[in-house]
Amino acid sequence: MSVAKVVDRKVFFAGQTVFKQGDKGDRAYLVQDGLIEISCMVPGYGEKILGTVGRGSIFGEMALVDNQPRMATAIAQEQTTVVIISADAFNEKLNKADPFIRALLNIFVRNLREAAKKQ
C-alpha cells in the first residue's frame, strides 16, 4: 500500500495550537472544515498575523518543501477539522513531480522565507 493513500484527520478546537513557530515540520494540513490563523513573532514588533486559511486550503507545507523549522504559528480560530498530510506522503508526491516544478517550489519557499525575515 502506498504511503500517500493513508489519510488521517484531526479536530482542533478554537484556540488550540496546531504548531508553533520554530517547530520541526513533519506534516502539512488540508483544512476540511473550519478556520486557522497563521501568525509569527517579528523581532521589534511582536506578533504579526499573516492571514487565515479555511476550507480547502493547505498550510504547513513550506517546512516539508525545504526541511526547515516552521516560520509561523497556526492556531484554530474555531473548531477545525484537518486532513493530515505526512512528510512521507508529501515527499512521495513531490518526488514524482517534474524536476523543474520541484526546483521552482524550492525557489518560492526560499523567497517567502527571505521576505518574511525582512518584515
Image: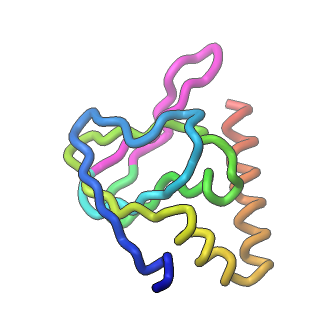
Q: Position of residue 68 (x, y in %)?
A: 68, 46
Please tell me whether the stretch drawn in magenta is mainly helix, strand or loop.
Answer: strand
* Camera-side residue of 73 and 23: 23
Q: Quadrant of residue 9?
A: bottom left
* Camera-side residue of 13 and 35: 13
Would you say 24 lies left or right of 8 here?
right
Where is the C terminus found, in terms of image quarters? top right
Q: Position of residue 109 (x, y in %)?
A: 69, 55
Say if 68 sits above or below 83 in the image. above
List the single residue furthest toward the top.
44
Q: Which residues are magenta?
A: 35-52
Q: Please name the residue shown 60% across and 39% down the image.
A: 71
Say if 41 sits above or below 81 in the image. above
Would you say 105 lies left or right of 51 here?
right
Q: Position of residue 117 (x, y in %)?
A: 71, 33
* Camera-side residue of 31 and 116: 31
Q: Please name the residue shown 30% across and 42% down the image.
A: 76
Would you say 14 lies left or right of 45 here?
left
